[in-house]
Amino acid sequence: MFTIFTNLRCLKFNPSSSVCNALSLNMTPETDISLTLLELHITVSDMEECLYILDGRFDQLRIFYVTCYSVLSCSLNIEHKEKVLANLRIFSLWCKHKIYHFDQSIVPLLRRMLNLEELDLNLTAHCYENFIDGDTLKKDILIYIPQLYKFTFNICSTIAHLNQTNFSLNEHIQTTFKYFSNNEIITSIDHFQEEAYSQCHIYSCPYKWKFYNNITNNFRGGLFTTVTEVSVYDECPFEYQFFLRIAQSFPFMKELTIGNRKAQNKKQFIKSNNNNQLL
């Protein structure tokens, strides 16, 4: 594609949610491409495709929105992994599958974007010792991007109980964001004894994404006008009041996925106006 449209300035390729429709660039380190592409919106099957785009062949790229399905260890050589992305100003990354090496894949990539002005991260990462919090973001990423003035994020990090027994309290996680310029940052921590893991969810406000995943009974509510897809999960039963809170918080919800095998303790019976049946 890029060898055919040699004068392309902006490309927006956003297929459906199916991984089979993700664009494969068929690029290798030997592929010689020289473009003046300035803006790119793309969905790729794995992180290696993303790194090939950012290995220097698109050195004029200023705006890059990428949705990535898989983040695995990549085979790019060290020269490409360390190449500074001096012209990139806006970067948005949405990883649909869980990342198991956040500090080895995402962090080094972001550190190359020295002149970045806007950054948006939407991902779930498996951690081994500590949750991703404000301190992690600042010391591992933000201090390397001094020109950044807009940072939005929706990050969930998980830790297996096998790897950790003492977890930070939500109050502590909240204090790690006290020096962030965002108006409000929401944090929450949930522990799942049966599945033997804990998770920490952090996001910047206002919430701008169209989905909200893995809501638990600890959900405090709010108003999320951009969200159309919701998933809920917990090891404790979801009671009637919980679903009322969900309905009030997501007035434009079109899709709801429920992950819970526990029966309700307090069932509510509502009489239908149409056929006088109990629901």
Image (spheres, helix red, strand yellow):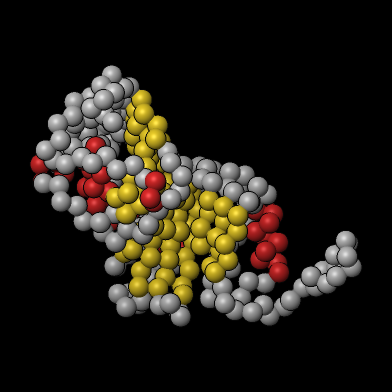
**Residue 68 x %, y %:** 35, 48
Q: Is residue 136 above or below residue 234?
A: above
For this view, does 278 lie left or right of residue 47? right
Residue furthest toward the top? 7
Q: Is residue 260 above or below residue 13?
A: below
Quarter holding the C terminus is bottom right
| Res 126 quadrant in image | bottom left
Q: Is residue 60 visible?
A: no
For this view, does 239 lie left or right of residue 131? right
| Res 255 quadrant in image | bottom right
Residue at image position (43%, 66%) is 199
| Res 65 quadrant in image | top left
Residue at image position (63%, 51%) is 254
Q: Is residue 220 above or below residue 195?
A: above
Residue at image position (19%, 52%) is 74
Quarter holding the N terminus is top left
**Residue 278 x %, y %:** 83, 72
For this view, does 114 lie left or right of residue 23? left
**Residue 32 x %, y %:** 14, 31
